[in-house]
Image: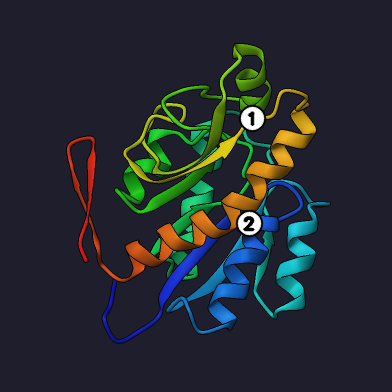
Amino acid sequence: MSANLPCRLGVLVSGSGTNLQAIIDRIEAGDLCAEIACVISNKADAFALTRAARHGIPVVVHENAGFPERQSYDATTVEILRSHKVDLVILAGFMRILTDVMVNAFPSAIMNIHPALLPSFQGLHAQQQAIDYGVRYSGCTVHFVDCGTDTGPIILQSVVPVEQDDTEATLSARIQKAEHHTFAAAIKLVVEGKIQVIGRKVRISA
């Protein structure tokens, strides 16, 4: 990332975009030296697109239909990101698993947030997995993306208690509040060059 210019973010979304909004808010508050170069959605009706448009951020609808395989879809996504001169890719509720085409195009420069304390409860419905297992604490994890499912090096985690009467919806809402702070904080560390990845471990400098 350049020390003089804002980091250019490309944000991939599929849904309502609450994490996108949290990032926008941090940028507009002057707390994050970044700009969102584009928001890409694989769902034309994703409310995240409306959020982006309200802030004058370029949006791209890039639906899955018409692509015979995930690799070809990802290759086109890479082209879109590069056309917007993106430095760092943010997965903010993007409901697709990335292939090596995407991961290799942006090595150690794709970040995701997962609603559990990885490596526990990978994949979909992590909140319900936590409830079913009977854990007392869950939370969220920001990690770099590799070619696995929620297996990349961990940057930050936040812990959220699991209440005895929690449902998937109530636990999800509690975790989501933690996500908004944690994701933006992790992005800030990367943007400011305070992250070093050594194998599976992420070192954070002061």
- Percent coordinates x, y for residue 96 in the rendering: 59, 35
Q: Looking at the image, which is closer to me, 198 or 57?
A: 198
- Percent coordinates x, y for residue 173 in the rendering: 73, 43
In this rendering, the answer to whether 27 lies above or below 81 is below
Q: Amino acid at mark 1?
A: Val
Q: Nearer the viewer, mark 1 or mark 2?
A: 1
Secondary structure found at label 1: loop
The circle drawn on residue 162 is: 1
User: Alpha-carbon distance for marks 1 and 2?
Assistant: 21 Å
Q: Quadrant of residue 115?
A: top right
> For mark 2, does the 10 Å Cα neighbourhood hold few (<14), some (14 to 19), or many (20 or more) residues?
many
Q: Is residue 91 left or right of residue 34?
A: right
> For mark 1, does the 10 Å Cα neighbourhood hold few (<14), some (14 to 19), or many (20 or more) residues?
many
- Residue pictured at 74% horizontal, 48% vertical: 15
Which of the marked residues, 1 or 2, is nearer the chain's N terminus? 2
Which residue was labeled with disc 2? Answer: 19
Q: Quadrant of residue 164?
A: top right
Q: Looking at the image, which is closer to me, 140 or 134?
A: 134
- Residue pictured at 33% horizontal, 62% vertical: 190
Q: Is residue 53 left or right of residue 71?
A: right
- Percent coordinates x, y for residue 134 in the rendering: 61, 15
Q: Is residue 143 left or right of residue 158?
A: left
Q: Amino acid at mark 2?
A: Asn
**Viewer can see residue 80:** no
Secondary structure found at label 2: helix
In this rendering, the answer to whether 156 lies above or below 29 is above
Q: Quadrant of the N terminus?
A: bottom left
- Residue pictured at 45% horizontal, 62% vertical: 185
Residue found farthest to the top: 133
The circle drawn on residue 123 is: none
Residue found farthest to the right: 45
**Viewer can see residue 192:** yes
